[in-house]
Amino acid sequence: MESDRDIIRRERAALRQRYGDLFDVVARILFDADPIDINYETNTDEYEPEVGTILPRLIEASTVEDVSRIVHEEFVHWFGADEADAVKNYQSVATRIWGAWQAFNRRES
């Protein structure tokens, strides 16, 4: 029987295989922006769970505003509405993720 940790590792490996370096790029964007103040300089994988739920939803996005909404919704899911704060605070992160997502799609086509 697989442990929860093994399941998480397997799912992240599958996401990395599907999205390639986009997974790491989005994780880095979130780590650098640190929207909920959990960047302690050495925990660079801290936002990987959120990346795992954001990436599959990017297919829904047609605009930066859509990405901002998606990222905010996922942060509310993971951290609660109070910790996630307002959707407007995700605009800069969303702009960077949108650019990375568009570059990924160009490479994939």
Image (cartoon, rainbow, N blue to C red):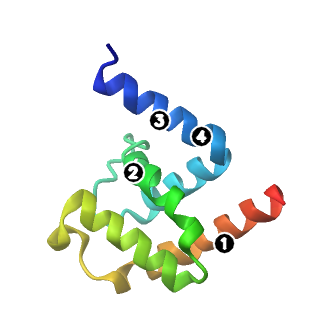
Disc 1 residue type? Gly
Asked if disc 3 and disc 2 are in contact, CB closer than 8 Å, the reply is no
Numbered mark located on residue 99 in the image: 1
Q: Nearer the viewer, residue 36 or 60?
A: 60
Viewer can see residue 14: yes
Residue 61 drawn at (x, y percent):
56, 75
Quadrant containing the N terminus in the rendered view: top left
Q: Estimate the spatial distance between the alpha carbons at disc 4 and disc 1, rounded to whole Å.
A: 18 Å
Asked if disc 4 and disc 2 are in contact, CB closer than 8 Å, the reply is no
Please tell me whether residue 102 is drawn above or below residue 55 in the rendered image. below
Front disc: 3 or 4: 3
Disc 3 residue type? Glu
Numbered mark located on residue 16 in the image: 4
Disc 4 residue type? Arg
Viewer can see residue 97: no
Residue bearing the label numbered 3: 11
Q: Which of marks 4 and 2 is nearer the N terminus?
A: 4
Q: Residue at x 15, y 73 (%)?
A: 82
Please tell me whether residue 21 is drawn above or below residue 103 in the rendered image. above
